[in-house]
Amino acid sequence: MQASKLIENIKFKRIVPELFEDFRVSLLTQDTREVIAGSIFVAIKGTRIDGHKLVQEAKKNGAAMIIAQEPLPDMTIPVVYVQNTNRAMAILSSFFYGASSQALRVIGVTGTNGKTTVTHIIEAIFSSLNENTGLIGTMYRKIGDEVLKTKNTTPDIITLQRTLNKMVEKGVSTVAMEVSSIALVQGRVWGIDFDVAVFTNLTEDHLDYHKTMAEYAHAKSLLFSQLGNKYAHSGDHKVAVLNNDDSLSKQLEEDTAAEVITYGIKNNAMIRATNVEIHGQGTNFDLTVFNKKYSVTVKMVGMFNVYNILAAFAAAYACGVSPEKIIKALEQFSGVKGRLQLLTSQNKVSAIVDYSHTPDGLLNALETINEFAKGKVFCIIGCGGDRDRFKRPKMGKIAVENSDFAIFTSDNPRSENPQVIIDEMLAGIPELKEIPTFIDRREAINFAVSMAQPGDIILVAGKGHEDYQIIGATKYHFDDAEEVKKAFELKEQMD
Ligand SMILES: CC(=O)N[C@H]1[C@@H](OP(=O)(O)OP(=O)(O)OC[C@H]2O[C@@H](n3ccc(=O)[nH]c3=O)[C@H](O)[C@@H]2O)O[C@H](CO)[C@@H](O)[C@@H]1O[C@H](C)C(=O)N[C@@H](C)C(=O)N[C@H](CCC(=O)O)C(=O)O
Ligand SMILES: Nc1ncnc2c1ncn2[C@@H]1O[C@H](COP(=O)(O)OP(=O)(O)OP(=O)(O)O)[C@@H](O)[C@H]1O
Ligand SMILES: N[C@H](CCC[C@H](N)C(=O)O)C(=O)O
Ligand SMILES: [Mg+2]
């Protein structure tokens, strides 16, 4: 695509110099490290770095044009001044990468907990129909069977548009995508044509970023207010999938112009589960789809997973998939790595690796485990550094009150002092209770495994699928499931 043609898509701009030699754009990027000859570099003012300060580096690396919102010294390459480079990046990337979301069925999932799980269930449903699927989220980006690494749960808009473009090339038809509140606020999904928007729940997290629960709720609502504001005649039918048991859904229903489909357990809903029975190996429930009833058995456990299943069911149903086909896929689905992942030692001690890293997530995981635990429940928990501090005392309290034996340790301390994080967790405990604490997560796991007796369950919470631990600025290899297996082996050798 020619540069002149691409920048035509921005209405209000000033080009310096006004007349420039046109060129074929090789790449559109906001990152100097990606720039190649013939690139357009978009200068973004980030939280750490101001891209405007890197324009010389971009030029040195081959950039042929700069998009900026602040005055730059004479550049000798054309500079397009716009009011907001973030918005310009969203517009340009949509045109440069062929507005691929319009050619795909895009299902966006937002909410504090359950996004990764719901997107995986949705992917499994559409794969079972022999569709070529795409998935974008915390763990990876997946194009069919190809797995691509990812930095953020919801990538920046250029990476996102590039990924969707690749999905179209590879024949993907349906994409399940996690949409984080931070991404919504930062405009990382501006211009994405969602077909279905799913809301899981809203509980406390990310208050370091959003400051108040009201702002956090507003961020989530953007996915719904941006959905379905035009009614196309081509059957391009937008649907909002809302959780009737979460009070925010009323607000989201008001925010969207799309048709709404509700799900729930406690309150009446269009898609509803009743008679839920959870046992060690899975869950049974009755599913009412409008007025029709089905009986369902799934391999996943936990009341919260019934919500996740209902959310995914409603999303697929909204796309016209029959209940029978959805149920068949649900019954096959065995869960997501690091979400209530069960490991058992030869001497019958169980460990569950789970990604619960919010107060609500931790409470849900512990409540589920307590439902089927025969022996004692251990809970190994830490809280991430450089993230919401307010959740630390709450998570400490939840761990102590809902397990027989809580052990506090480090999650990803990042730039913070790990002992300070542990002390903030200890501050949430009402009485002066003796809690074993280990800065070293491996030691915490070994300690719990050495203490546990046959029949006991050890919840290793907070890091789920993560195969790293970030201490300071260094990312070390660390995998909870691997560590548990090693600790089990060590114990078996000693016994
Ligand atoms: C606080 C935050 O949200 N930061 C995000 C933000 O980065 P930033 O504003 O700090 O960017 P920056 O590092 O200052 O860089 C500014 C600009 O300079 C450019 N740059 C930078 C360095 C360089 O050498 N060359 C260069 O060109 C960068 O490409 C960027 O355009 O924009 C980046 C691109 O979109 C994101 O990758 C980055 O996410 C960081 C890694 C992060 O940790 N974010 C977390 C808080 C987050 O977004 N989490 C959510 C929710 C998670 C969940 O609940 O599941 C997520 O969606 O991941
Ligand atoms: N619907 C739910 N309600 C409450 N807790 C849940 C729900 N689903 C999952 N959880 C808990 O939250 C943890 C994280 O689940 P999941 O990864 O699906 O959420 P997520 O929204 O993608 O999280 P993240 O914001 O980190 O990407 C799980 O390990 C589980 O303990
Ligand atoms: N998406 C969440 C994941 C938290 C996972 C936890 N292990 C941590 O590092 O705090 C975040 O970035 O806040
Ligand atoms: Mg996720």
Image: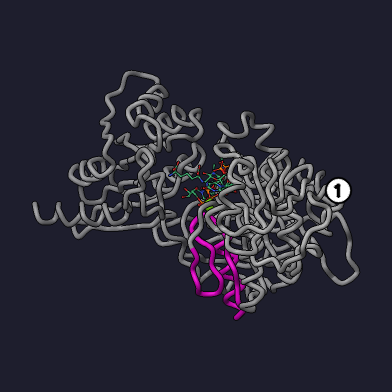
Membership of 456 in magenta stretch: no
Where residue 58 appears, as percent x and y from the top left, is 59, 52
Where residue 178 appears, as percent x and y from the top left, is 60, 55
The magenta segment:
119-148
Q: Quarter holding the N terminus? A: bottom right
State the image quarter where residue 289 is shown: bottom right
Residue beneath the point at 73% across and 53% down: 78
Left or right, 163 with respect to 481, comes to right
Where residue 253 appears, as percent x and y from the top left, is 79, 47
Secondary structure, mark 1, is loop
Q: Amino acid at mark 1?
A: Phe
Tell me: residue 289, above or below residue 370: below
Q: Where is mark 1, residue-wise?
A: 12
Left or right, 299 with respect to 125, comes to left
Tell me: residue 471, above or below residue 116: above
Membership of 136 in magenta stretch: yes
Residue 292 makes an appearance in the image: no
- Of 139 and 374, the residue lying toward us: 139
